[in-house]
Amino acid sequence: MTSPVSYELVDDIGVISVANPPVNALSHAVRQGIHDALAAAQQDASKAVLVICEGRTFIAGADITEFGKPPREPHLPDLCNTIEASSKPVVAAIHGTALGGGLEVALSCHYRCAVPAAKVGLPEVKLGLLPGAGGTQRLPRLIGATPALDMMTSGNPVDAARAASLGLIDQLVDGDLRTAALAWCRELAAKDAPRRKTSELTADSVAEGVLEQYRSTIAKRARGQVAPQKIVDCVEASLTRPFAEGLQIEREKFIECMQSPQSAALRHMFFAEREAAKIQGLSKDSPQRDVNKVGIIGGGTMGSGIAMNFANAGMQVVLLEINDEALARGLAIIDRNYKGGVKRGKLSEDQALACRGRIAGATDYQSLSDADLVIEAVFENLDLKKEVFAKLDATCRQGAILATNTSYQDVDSIAAATKRPRDVIGLHFFSPAHIMKLLEVVRASATADDVLATCMALAKKIRKVPVVSGVCYGFIGNRMLGHYAREAQLCVIEGATPEQVDGAMEDWGMAMGPLAVFDLAGLDVGYKARQGLPEAERGDPRAYRVADALVEMNRLGQKTGAGFYRYDPETRQRSSDPEVQALIEREAAALGVERRELEASEIVDRLLFALVNEGMNILDEGIAQRPGDIDVVYVYGYGFPAWRGGPMHYADAVGLAQVHERIREFERRFGSENWTPAPLLERLASAGMTLADWAKSQVN
Ligand SMILES: NC(=O)c1ccc[n+]([C@@H]2O[C@H](COP(=O)([O-])OP(=O)(O)OC[C@H]3O[C@@H](n4cnc5c(N)ncnc54)[C@H](O)[C@@H]3O)[C@@H](O)[C@H]2O)c1
C-alpha cells in the first residue's frame, strides 16, 4: 500500500506532504508516514522541514474509523515530541481547518503559517475528551492560559486572524500556500532561525483566583460535564509543572475522560447523528428533485422561522397568508428575527438584507404554482390542513413536493386530500424554527423515495439535523414527550412542587425542566391538542387537571406572564407562585390524592423511563429506524443533555434489566394504565441485550 505521506527535497527544504482525503485524518498510516519522513529529513541536506497537506484542508483531526480500536504506534503524543525534537526547524503550513490532533501536530512544529481563510481548534471537549497529544501543555505556553482555556473548553475553532493575534500563527500568507511557505522556510533557514520548541516556552502566569473563577464559570456553562474541568486541571499543570510532568497529567486525565460514560455518550451522539442521515432501504445516491423556490403557507410562529431557513440557504421563498394583515404580521416576525440575529452578531446587516430580500409575501395560491417545495404551517387542524392540500393539488406544478409541518396530525390523511400522495411528506420543524437544529422528516405510507431523499439532503442544506419518522400521533419526539409530560404533572399532583420537578430534571442535565418548557411553548398548545382528541385518547385526566385549569385562568405561560410560574416582564426570570401551589393542592384534594414528599431520584426515573418505555414501542413499531435516531431527536429537539447520550443510550448505560425492573415497580405502584413495560424492553432485558446490540442485529 502506498503511504498517504510523501517526502521530497525541494532545493534545501524537506517537504512532508499529507494526502489522505477527504480531511487528511491522522490515521495510523499518516502518523507512520510523518514519522518516517521526519526521520529521512534528519539525514538529508534539508535545512528546514515543511509539513503541508494536499486537498481541502490541513489535518482536521483523528481518524474516526480508528475510534475504539487498540492504538498502534507511533502514538500521536510521541510523534508530536519527535517533531519538536527534530534537529532542523519544522514549519507547519495550514489551510482549511487544523483541528484536534492536526493542531497538536502544528503546535509541536517550531513555526506555523496559515492562509487567512484557515481555522484552528481543539474540539475534543465535544466528544467528552481533552487534547491528549500535548495540546493542553503546549497551547497555554504558546498563547497564555485564558485564551487556551477558552479554545479548549468551548471546542470552537478560531479564525486565522484571531490565531495570529494570539501568537498561535506566526505568519499569515497570501497567494499559493506552498510557494509562500517554502519561501518562508528558506528565509528561516537563511537566518539560522532557532528551533522554537513550544514545550520550552513558559506560559504567562495568571492572577490568583483566575483558574477558580474559570472553573465556576464552566460549572454553569457546561453544567455536569467533566472534561472541561479536567482541561482546567491540565492547564493548571502547564503553569506550575515542568512540561514532562504536565504531559503525564494530561495522559492520566485523557484516559479518565476516554473511559468516562460522558465521553461514551458524546461519541455515541457523534455517530448517531451521522447514521440518522441514512435511510433504510434507500441508497446514498438515490435520485433527488431540484428545489430552488420554496412556498410556505402560514406566517405564524413556525412559518416565519421556516421561511428564514430557506432564504438563509440562498433559496427564493414565498410566504402565503390568509390576508394582508396576517401577512404583514408574519413578515414583521421575520424582520424582527433578522434584526435580533444582527444584534447578536450571527450575521451582518448586509447578509440579513440579502436573506430578507429572498422572502416575498403573497395572499393567493397562484404565486405557489411554480414552487418546487411547499411547506404548510397553518393552524393545527386536520380539516384545515386537508383543505390547504386540496388547493395545493389544484395549483402546484407536477413534481412539486408538498410538505406539512403538523405536530400531531396524520400525514397519510393529509396526503389523501391530494391526487398525488407520493409527493406528500411531513417536515416537522421545532420552535424557534430558524434556530432549532432538529427536523423530523415524516415518511408517509405513499411518500416517494426521491421526495424523501430530496428532503434529507435539503435538511443538510438548511443546516438542520434530519431524522426520519414513520406516521403516528406526535411522531417520535412529541409522542414520547406525552409520557414524560404526564409523569411530570402527576408528580406535581402527588406532592412535588413545579420547582422540585424542574429542579430535579435540570440538576440531572436537561436544559430546562418540563413545566418551564410548557410555559415557554404556551400551555394553550397542549390544551388545544387535547381538545382536538376524543376523550379516551387524551391520556390520564389526572395529569392535565392543573394545566387545563391554568389555561382556563388565562395563564398560558411566558406569553401571558404566568403559567406554572410567574415571569418577570423584563428579565423573563421565573418565580414560584403561591396561587399555583394552592391550585395544585385543590386539584389534588378533588382527586382524592394524599400528597407526599417525592425524592428527586423518583422524579428523574419516572420522567426518563416514561420516555424510554415509549421509545421502545416506537422502535418495535418501526416508527424510528434505530435507537440512535431517537437520541438525536431528543438531544437536538428537546434539550436532552448530549453528554447523557439521549434517552435510549441512557437506558443502555443504566442497564436495560434495571430499567425494566424499575418500570415494573412503577407498574405495581401506579397501575398498568401508565406503566406497562414495552415488549421490546422485556425481550431485551430478559435476553441480557443492550439496545446497541439490538440495533446491530437489526441491520444484519
Ligand atoms: N408552535 C410550535 O412550537 C410548533 C412546533 C412544531 C410544529 N408546529 C406546527 O406548526 C403549525 C403552525 O403552528 P404555529 O405555532 O406557527 O401557529 P400560528 O398560529 O402561530 O400560525 C399559524 C398561521 O397560519 C395562518 N393561516 C391559517 N390558515 C391559513 C390558510 N388557510 N392559509 C394561509 N395561512 C393560514 C394564520 O394566519 C397564522 O398566521 C401547526 O401545525 C403546529 O402544530 C408548531
Image (spheres, rainbow, N blue to C red):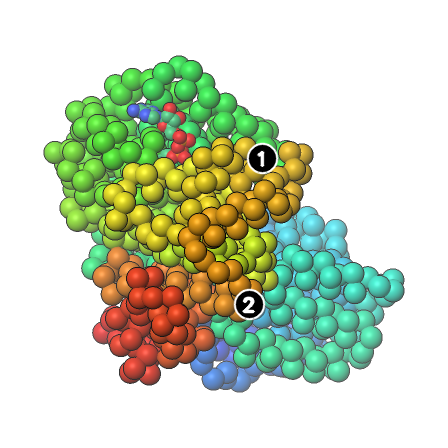
In three-dimensional space, the C-alpha distance between marks 1 and 2, rounded to whole angstroms, equals 29 Å
Which residue in the protein does label 2 denote? 599
Kind of residue indicated by mark 2: Glu
Q: Residue 685, located in which quarter of the rendered image?
A: bottom left
Dot 1 falls on a residue whose secondary structure is: loop
Q: Is residue 32 above or below residue 673?
A: below
Ligand number 1: quarter of image: top left
Left or right: residue 505 versus residue 139 is left
Q: Is residue 244 above or below residue 330?
A: below
Residue at 54% x, 79% y: name it: 259
619 or 50: nearer the viewer? 619
Chain-order first, disc 1 or disc 2: 1
Q: Is residue 549 above or below residue 493?
A: above
Q: Residue furthest left?
A: 419
Residues at marks 1 and 2 touching, judged by CB atoms closer than 8 Å: no
Q: Is residue 185 above or below residue 362?
A: below
620 or 353: nearer the viewer? 620
Residue 21 visible in the picture: no
Left or right: residue 577 versus residue 70 is right
Residue at 38% x, 77% y: name it: 661
Q: Residue furthest top?
A: 324
Which residue in the protein does label 1 denote? 561
